[in-house]
Amino acid sequence: MNCLKRREFLSNLVMTFSVTSFGIHFSTFAEDDTELMNKFMKISEKLTGNSELDTELGKKYLEYFMIDKNNRAKIFELHSYLNLKIPDFRKDLKKLSKEILLSWYTGIVKVNGSSRLVTYTGALSWTTLQGIKPQGFCGGEFGYWTKKPKIN
C-alpha cells in the first residue's frame, strides 16, 4: 500500500479541486441564451409545480434576473440541483430560487432592492387561488358572485 505524505496529499487535493472548479466554471458560461432560458423554465416548473408556465412571461422574468450578471452562473448552478436539495452553504442559490418562485406567484421582481411589476393578471396567484380574480376584472356575467364557485 502506497502512503502519501501530507504535502503530496494536499497538493493532489488542491489540483483536483482547481480542475473540478475550472470545469464547473467553464460549463456555466459556455452555454447560450436559449439553454439559459430552457434551464430557467425547468427551474421555474420545478419550483411552482406547474409544467404549463407562460414562456413569454418567463423571458420577461429572466430578463430582470439577468440585470445582476452573477445570476447567469447561479441559474446554471441552480439547475444542477434540480432534483437535489440545495446545500445549506449555498444561501445565494436558496435566495435566488425563492425570488424566482415569488416572481411567478406575485408578478413582481426585485431589482437592486426595488420591486418592479412584470405582470398583474399573469401572476400565478390568480389562477392558483380559486374563486378570486384580479381587482378590476369581472369574473363572469352580471350576478356571477351570487353563485357558489365550482371547485375541482
Image: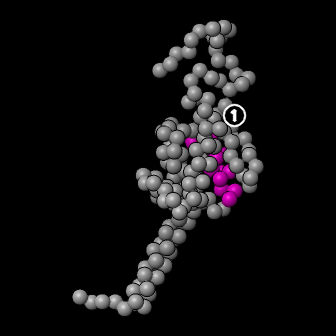
Q: Secondary structure at mark 1?
A: loop
Q: Amino acid at mark 1?
A: Tyr
Q: Residue 125: horizontal and vertical position, in percent?
A: 60, 32
Residue 60 inside the magenta-drawn segment: yes
**How many numbered badges does the structure rendering display?**
1
Q: Say if the magenta span includes residue 3.
A: no
Please rate how many residues cluster around mark 1, counting C-alpha atoms within 10 Å: few if below 14, some from 14 to 19, many from 20.
Answer: some
Q: Image point 51% across, 59% down: which residue?
A: 88
* Residue 94 occupies quadrant: bottom right
Find disc 1 in the rendering and name its residue. Answer: 120
Q: Is residue 111 above or below residue 137?
A: below
The picture places residue 130, in percent across and down from the top left corner, at: 56, 24
* Horizontal and vertical percent position of residue 152: 47, 20
In the image, the segment drawn in magenta is 55-68
The residue sitting at 65% across, 38% down in the picture is 106
The correct choice, above or below, for 75 with respect to 123 in the image is below
Measuring 72% from the left and 41% from the top, which residue is drawn there? 117
In the depicted view, which residue is nearer to us: 113 or 89? 89
Q: Is residue 138 left or right of residue 53?
A: right
Name the chief secondary structure element in magenta. Answer: helix
Viewer-closest of 63 and 73 = 73
Task: Measuring from the top left, give residue 12's x and y in whole percent.
Answer: 41, 85
Q: Is residue 112 above or below residue 17?
A: above
Q: Front-most of 15 and 88?
A: 88
Residue 6's image quarter?
A: bottom left
Extreme-right residue of the structure: 114
Q: Is residue 32 visible?
A: no
| Quarter placement of the N terminus | bottom left
